[in-house]
Image (cartoon, rainbow, N blue to C red):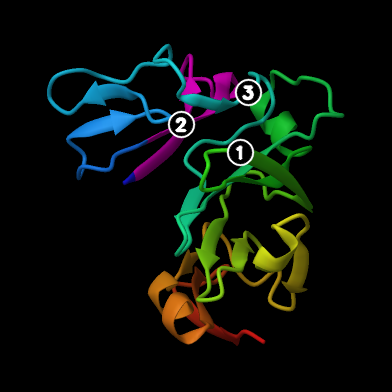
């Protein structure tokens, strides 16, 4: 079991900060930090923001970091975490809505030895919405982003860059997409569920991967 999250200091989303990570290899009885040290036991002790070794990437406050984006794991145990916030070149902005207009998507991924890497997708966010990740049987990673853009990174390139594969459906939908992750992993077909703008309809979109 794997968990990733950020920490918020106040009700103001601008105080979101950091990428935090723990995992359990005993069905949730105990929880370990990135290096394998036990930091909590269910029902006995708790993880706090000061628990040792749980922060795996520093992201400061006032960076437009939205909480609860998405995480996925491939068949080899690699973890991918989708986050969106301002690129490093942008100055801090304590106005969360303003910061979101300057934010982009990032893939944070962990290899089997526990090393984390950050890759910028170079793709802007839609201010109030979140994207989703899914992984194919070949362990290539797909991001379905709001307004509907589909991007991918390959295991062959060590996920070093992201390419937009499809944006033909942009503008038709709103809110956060949902992905049939099981179908992608077994059939290599990307199925996306998305509510249409100005409609009560939920559209199911199928994409065949090549």
Look at the magenta stretch and give its main secondary structure.
Answer: strand
Of the image marks 3 and 2, the number of the one nearer the N terminus: 2
Contact between marks 3 and 2 (CB within 8 A): the answer is no
Residue 162, quarter of picture: bottom right
- Front residue (pair 30, 6): 30
Q: Is residue 201 visible?
A: no
Callout 1: SS: strand
* Structural crowding at the residue carrying mark 2, measured as other residues with C-alpha within 10 Å and reported as few (<14), some (14–19) or many (≥20): many
Q: Could you tell me residue 83's position as x and y percent? A: 60, 42
State the SS at label 3.
loop
Residue 18 belongs to magenta span: yes
Q: CA distance from mark 2 to mark 1?
A: 10 Å
The image quarter in which residue 98 lies: top right
**Cβ–Cβ below 8 Å for labels 1 and 3?**
no
- Give me the C-alpha separation between circle 1 and circle 3: 12 Å
Q: CA distance from mark 3 to mark 2?
A: 14 Å
**Residue 99 screen position, x and y as percent:** 73, 30
Q: Nearer the viewer, residue 185 or 173?
A: 185
**Sequence order check: which comes first, mark 2 or mark 1?**
2
The quadrant in which the C terminus is found is bottom right
Residue that label 3 marks: 58
Q: Magenta residues, as a range? A: 2-22
Under tag 2, what secondary structure?
loop
Image height of 55 relative to 154, above or below: above
Please give the residue where the numbered disc 2 appears in the rendered image: 34
Which dot, 1 or 3, sits closer to the camera?
1
- Quickly name the residue at label 1: 116
Q: Are marks 2 and 1 in contact (CB under 8 Å)?
A: yes
């Amino acid at each position: 079991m794997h968990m990733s999250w950020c920490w918020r200091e106040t009700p103001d989303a601008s105080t979101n900060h950091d990428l935090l990570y723990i995992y359990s290899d005993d069905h949730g009885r105990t929880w370990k930090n990135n290096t394998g040290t036990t930091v909590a036991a269910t029902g006995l002790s708790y993880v706090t923001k000061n628990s040792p070794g749980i922060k795996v990437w520093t992201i400061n406050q006032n960076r437009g970091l939205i909480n609860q984006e998405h995480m996925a794991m491939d068949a080899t145990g690699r973890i991918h975490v989708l986050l969106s916030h301002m690129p490093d070149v942008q100055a801090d902005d304590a106005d969360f809505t303003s910061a979101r207009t300057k934010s982009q998507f990032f893939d944070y991924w962990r290899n089997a030895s526990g090393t984390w890497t950050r890759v910028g997708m170079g793709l802007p966010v839609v201010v109030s919405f979140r994207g989703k990740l899914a992984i194919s049987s070949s362990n290539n990673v797909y991001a379905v982003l709001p307004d509907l853009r589909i991007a991918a990174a390959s295991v062959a390139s060590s996920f070093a860059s992201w390419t937009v594969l499809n944006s033909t459906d942009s503008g038709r939908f709103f809110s956060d997409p949902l992905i049939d992750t099981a179908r992608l992993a077994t059939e290599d077909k990307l199925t996306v569920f998305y509510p249409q703008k100005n409609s009560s309809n939920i559209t199911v979109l199928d994409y065949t991967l090549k």
